[in-house]
Amino acid sequence: MLIKRRAGWDMPENQATPESVFLNRRQLMAAGAGLIAGAALPGAAAAQSADPTVDLYPAKRNAAYVLGVPQTAEEDAANYNNFYEFGMSKDIVDASKRLATRPWNIQVDGLVEKPFEIGFDDLIRKLPIEERLYRFRCVEAWAMAVPWTGIPLKSFVALAKPLAGAKYIRFETFMNPRVAPGQNQRWYPWPYTEGLTIAEATNELPLLVTGIYGKPLPTQHGAPIRLITPWKYGFKSVKSIRKISFVAERPKTFWEGLQASEYGFWANVNPAVPHPRWSQASEQILGSRERRPTQIYNGYGEQVAGLYKGLEGEKLFM
Ligand SMILES: Nc1nc2c(c(=O)[nH]1)N[C@H]1C(S)=C(S)[C@@H](COP(=O)(O)O)O[C@H]1N2
Ligand SMILES: [Mo]
């Protein structure tokens, strides 16, 4: 690959996660470091209050999903993000506000009974949304635990009516280098894409997320709609989805296109399988100085381990 510069994903864990970024946002503000990031954009505030889905929040919580670890503070989750379209740093909140999330159409194509395009505001009223508390683990070894709101992916798959030949789903992010400066960096295989098998997609866990902390999703978290697969490393959870394709062949993902030796298709969390350049045995808790041990499948083995029976020959954990 042509990757010569050491980007965020390309750093050893201790560099990718400097201690200061885990400190509470208030502590950073107090230290005077958050003045610019904390300044409100009046235009964006107006857009937020005009969100046409705000009446749907907070959605009813599904009590079947419990964290087992403390919930992350909203401001910690909201100010430490990976969204390379808007820059390599974790501080992309303001840059991401340039993304216009209305109108927002999602194209559904490939091996389905009838390909269609649907407006996000129609989709969210067509399929029920619910709130779920999920743990979340980035491959860089930081972790959080947050209340997402969204549509179970399996109910979306039922709506799309895949044909028998559909074995995988491919998700694609928007492409607009004029608002997303990162997309001008030609050595990345834009647009960001990810994929799941149909069996994974129809498991109970994956959510098409539309909200967080009882509100519509802010742009830095991937508004208006993103995927969340809590048993896989965070890069599988593709943001700001524009296209969902049902396909026969395993799609090549953004990270595989960039560095296949380090980022594979499956990317299931496993403390015993290190990233080629750092350990995955423990994780740094966002908003604190503490680490805790990593759990296999990020603690969701009961729900997902069965998906991988018979696939032991695959690189399931990277
Ligand atoms: N389109 C897009 N989706 C993306 C990314 C990205 O850079 N672009 N980063 C991924 C990575 S590496 C992580 S850890 C999560 C971060 O989600 P969060 O910022 O909402 O916590 O988003 C994932 N989805
Ligand atoms: Mo990540």
Image (cartoon, rainbow, N blue to C red):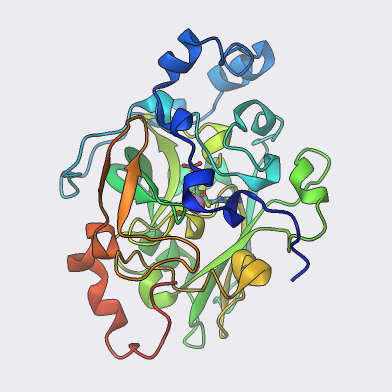
Kindly identify the residue that appears in the image at 79 percent across and 61 percent down: 187
Horizontal and vertical percent position of residue 279: 38, 61
Q: Quadrant of residue 229?
A: bottom left
Tally of marks: 0
Horizontal and vertical percent position of residue 220: 56, 35
Q: Is residue 202 left or right of residue 17?
A: left
| Residue 192 or residue 260, whichever sits in front | 260
Kindly identify the residue that appears in the image at 69 percent across and 40 percent down: 87
Query: Where the C terminus falls, by quadrant?
Result: bottom left
Horizontal and vertical percent position of residue 172: 63, 60
| Residue 318 or residue 291, whichever sits in front | 291
Kindly identify the residue that appears in the image at 62 percent across and 33 percent down: 92
Mark yes or no: residue 204 visible: no
Q: Quadrant of residue 171?
A: bottom right
| Residue 80 or residue 236, whichever sits in front | 80
Please determine whether, in this image, residue 310 is positioned above or below residue 16: below
Horizontal and vertical percent position of residue 272: 30, 69
| Residue 218 or residue 112, whichever sits in front | 218
Q: Is residue 186 left or right of residue 130?
A: right
Q: Is residue 5 left or right of residue 31?
A: right
Kindly identify the residue that appears in the image at 75 percent across and 52 percent down: 175
Q: Quadrant of residue 261?
A: bottom right
